[in-house]
Image (cartoon, helix red, strand yellow):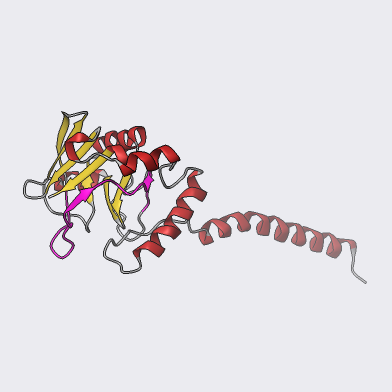
Amino acid sequence: MKTLQQITGLIAALLLLTIGTAQAEPAEAMRNHKPHVIEEINPFDPNIEQVLEEFDRIYEEETGQPSHLPDSFIDDIIGFASCSRNTCAVWAQVVKSTQRMYLYVNGSLRGSWLVSTGMSGYGTPNFDRHPDGRIYDRYTSGKYPGGDYKGLGNMPYAVFITGGFALHGTPQGNWSKLGTRASHGCIRMHPDNGYVFNRLVRQYGKYNVWITVQ
């Protein structure tokens, strides 16, 4: 038969064990918690469409925002008789030879800034078309974690041309490379400029925007 002192000791030990477990569980949970990040898009991936569909799902779940610009009957009509280049409300002209983008709004030059297109082995193709409607405000890369811009990840304000090719902002670690070929196929720019272009695309819609990469 246990003495009162032994029983008291057992109760104290159990209390310490319970408290210790309660304190350890959150720490363990934090160690095991891995924030979901969207891996870097490889625009040349033959399965890019399936990859993008999964990224769309993640983006919408995490932000509560649509991954594409809305389509409507009016949009379809506009698309049927759409503009091109400087006849569009917004025209983004990317010149790879000078690594510079020219942004025209309603026929007038709104801005000109340095960009980075694809480096050797990841050359950005030429494009002459409307964006495809996929648009993200934030995009987090786990594969190429070159920093985070104001909580918006590595590819803020992405506007997709087609497939995995997009124009987007880039974090500060890449700003010194703007003006040189340095990306993995997308078109990088300063995030302030990325924001301007992203908001114009949202404002005017994909059929009033044209992107030329030449």
Query: Residue at 48% across / 44% down in the picture?
Result: 63
Q: Quadrant of the N terminus?
A: bottom right
Q: Is residue 131 magenta?
A: yes
User: Would residue 70 be found to the left or right of residue 167 on screen?
Assistant: right
Q: Nearer the viewer, residue 58 or 18?
A: 58
Query: Residue farthest to the left?
Result: 97
Looking at the rendered structure, the number of numbered marks drawn on it comes to: 0
Q: Nearer the viewer, residue 121 or 104?
A: 104
Magenta stretch: dominant SS? loop
Q: Where in the figure is residue 12, as x and y percent of width and height?
A: 77, 58
Q: Where in the figure is residue 120, as x and y percent of width and height?
A: 13, 62
Q: Nearer the viewer, residue 191 or 117?
A: 117
Instruction: Give the extent of the magenta segment.
Output: 116-140
Query: Residue farthest to the bottom?
Result: 1
Query: Residue at 31% across / 55% down in the picture?
Result: 145
Q: Is residue 59 magenta?
A: no
Task: Specify the quadrant of the image occupied by residue 138.
Answer: top left
Q: Where in the figure is residue 70, as x and y percent of width and height?
A: 44, 42
Q: Where in the figure is residue 136, as x and y percent of width and height?
A: 38, 45
Query: Residue at 36% across / 36% down in the picture?
Result: 202
Residue 208 visible in the snapshot:
yes
User: Would residue 69 be found to the left or right of residue 147 on screen?
Assistant: right
In this view, 38 is above or below 131: below
Q: Nearer the viewer, residue 5 or 178?
A: 178
Residue 206 visible in the snapshot:
no
